[in-house]
Amino acid sequence: MLVDFHVHLYDEAGYGEALAETAKNLGVDRLCIAGGESQYGLAPNAEVRRQADLYPELYVPFAHVSLGEDTAATVERLKRVGFEGLCVWSPPAPYDDESFFPVYEAAAALTMPILFHTGYLPPTPLDRAKRVRSANMRPVYLDTLARYFPRLSIVGVGLGSPWCEEAAEALRYHANVFFDLSGDVLRRKGAEFFGGLLRPAHGAPWNEDSGGNLWGRVVFGSAVRHEEIASVERDYQRIFRSLALNQQDIEAVMGQTATRLLSLSAGA
């Protein structure tokens, strides 16, 4: 099963239909779709839910929530109307600010994975008014969340670029942390870079989970327009070939891990 864990639904007429056609042509079995804020051209949650109803065997709906504004009750309502996961970005404080904990607690209790934007966001004219700070989205803050919410499935994006080392350490020490390699990180960094970061570590007796196979917690995510998904998939495959990853690891990245996170059946 091929699963794209990080797909943007744009606020354009016919975009959901075009995305579905692209997925069919590429052989993508499931796509986790999410909208978001208008300054990025993304669709509202209501449209995400509508598209999931139109393509129930293809789309897995994720709801955008605004940390600092939305509450645990918001998360519970979103689950009731059929959302399977959440996505967050641009928090008004670092991700591990305690004021956000009720949202995380609700998501953990409802088994809703959260997709966290980690790293830089593209600039917009509204950044100052919205007080956007990329530093609030450093992957090191996911370390705190993994410690405090061990039942929460935490998925960061783009290996936290430019803080990739922080992201890799969060992967190494927390079994409930995952990352995709979306954005342009695959093109800016060579295979040797990823091979080094995600190589099993040795000699860390204080943590029996250290040194595991980190590729088992990397998921395929494109985070691009539908016309570019094929190009991102080729970037993943290029890295796999360069590192001579075994087939088991490749299958985990391209769908098996996501299938488990989303509790999808193999034939879904």
Image (cartoon, rainbow, N blue to C red):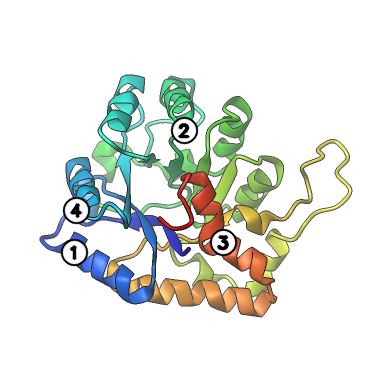
Q: Is residue 148 above or below residue 182?
A: above
Name the residue rendered at 37%, 40% in the picture: 84
Q: CA distance from mark 2 to mark 1?
A: 28 Å
Residue type beneath disc 2: Thr
Q: CA distance from mark 1 to mark 4?
A: 9 Å
Q: Front-most of 84 and 86?
A: 84
Which residue corresponds to mark 3? 253
Q: Is residue 51 above or below residue 246?
A: above
Which residue corresponds to mark 4? 54
Name the element at disc 3: helix
Name the residue rendered at 78%, 45% in the picture: 210
Q: CA distance from mark 3 to mark 4?
A: 27 Å
Q: Position of residue 251 (x, y in %)?
A: 58, 65
N-terminal-most mark, 4 or 2:
4
The residue most toward the front is 267
Name the element at disc 1: helix
Q: Is residue 58 above or below residue 117?
A: below
Which residue corresponds to mark 2? 111
Q: Front-most of 132 and 237?
A: 237
Q: CA distance from mark 3 to mark 2?
A: 21 Å
Q: Position of residue 75 (x, y in %)?
A: 34, 27
